[in-house]
Amino acid sequence: MAPLAAGQEGPDRILGARLQRLRASRRLTQKALAEPGYTAAYVSTVEAGKARPSEAALRYFAERLAVSYEELAAGVPGGLRAEIREGQAEAQRLMDGDEGERAEALLADLIGKAGDHDLSDLVAELRITLGSFLLRRGGLAAGREQFEQAEALLTDQPLPARVRAIRGRATAHYLEGDVRYSCYLLESTINELNGGGLPDPASLMLLYAAVIGPYLELGALERATKAASLALDLAPRVSDPVAIATLHRSVARTLAAGGRFDEAEAALVKAQEVYQQWEIRVELAQCHWMRGYLHAQHDRLDAAEIELRTAADMLRASGAAFYAVQVEVELADVRWRLGHTAEAEEVLGGLLAGLGPGHGAVHAAAAHHLLGVIREGAGDLDAAERHYRAAIELQQEADVTGDLADTSRLLGDLLDRQGRTREAVEAYRHGLTRLARPGTTTLGPAPLPPPVIPAAGAMPRGL
């Protein structure tokens, strides 16, 4: 070990001085602090920085001094953790009140404070919270970076401790349009958890719920349904009601994709009850978003418009502008179906300014797809073709195979009606042929189910 520079104290001496200061402030002698577990001579040696106490000894002294182990061992001020967690809750309140800049500034201050005292677990937790805020506001790359930094801080921790950071990173890739890589991250983590023996049920349920969206975008309904089933099997072992509500919301997507709309509605009701009770506005807004989608599928367009407008207004009021834009793409579709074509076209054109490659690519593609349909209906075939091709490019990059096939069919039909048969055939073929890219999931074998025995009274799979 290199010698200390002049005036520099080693960690043992710093710890010893801290122990001496705390003992003196409580007017305890070395003997009073030491006995009955240790000797006064041992305390003297530790205070002089000549011995490094064991964790057991530090915990013993901390209890005698009525301080936390962390305060004695690392000099973390008493109550700092509680202060930081209170600040984190305040940041959440500010964000829900559309004071995003203040929330982010507060989180940055808390990250610095926790970092100054080497509280890496709290720094990671705060970065995950900040990353989630940034995703809401459309800062996808910045949000992903926060999740990456949190994951790096937790490198030496067990995998369950890293799951929320991994899920956040996967969500960022998903929103950026890299759906296949998002799926790969989640699948890999699921397999690692299951391969390690009896996994953490809450972590595993979180991952299964998160992978449902990417599976549906990739057209893998069977796999999404299986993930929902496995997550529901784990739910009785999870005590967090908000996590279970999020699961129900994800399961509702699977049920809706399978045409089981009444069951999807029931799942949303369960989720909404929890979000309302806990006053979690962004997630509650997403339930309204999903309910609007269900109404639209049943051609209940007036009801769909009400739900989608409610969702968009709630999201914007909560600072979740990026999610609001996605809802408004679907709202424009409903307005078009209600006969307000010019309005829908104008809204979609404006929304595309905030969407595109790496930034809501799936919804940008949906906007171009709908604009293509509108332009084709108006007889503007050149504009329709441009929009279809723009949608296809985005859908191909994101690997959303179902949407890609649908848009390619529309483009093929458009080209065929113009007598451009060879181009039409190529468009049809392009929509039906998907090649897996090296280095990402191939959607081959599904992740193995968890090695757990279903609990008595487990939640039924069909909700």
Image (cartoon, rainbow, N blue to C red):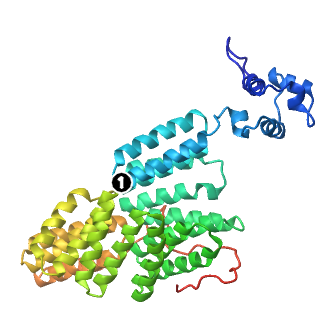
Examine the image and state in which quarter residue 136 appears.
bottom left
**Counting other residues with Cα less than 10 Å from the Cα at mark 1, is it few (<14), some (14-19), or many (20 or more)?**
some
Q: Is residue 154 above or below residue 413?
A: above
Examine the image and state in which quarter residue 18 appears.
top right
Viewer can see residue 220: no
Report x, y in % for residue 251: 48, 78
Camera-side residue of 393 and 159: 159
Furthest-top residue in this view: 6
Report x, y in % for residue 447: 58, 73
Q: Residue at x 61, y 79 (%)?
A: 233
Furthest-front residue in this view: 27
Q: Quick one: SS at disc 1?
A: loop
Q: Residue at x 49, y 76 (%)?
A: 248
Camera-side residue of 354 and 104: 104
Q: Residue at x 6, y 78 (%)?
A: 379
Examine the image and state in which quarter residue 427 appears.
bottom left
212 vs 155, left or right, is left
Q: Amino acid at mark 1?
A: Gly
367 vs 184, left or right, is left
Q: Which residue is mark 1?
A: 97
Query: Looking at the image, how many numbered discs can be counted on the residues?
Result: 1
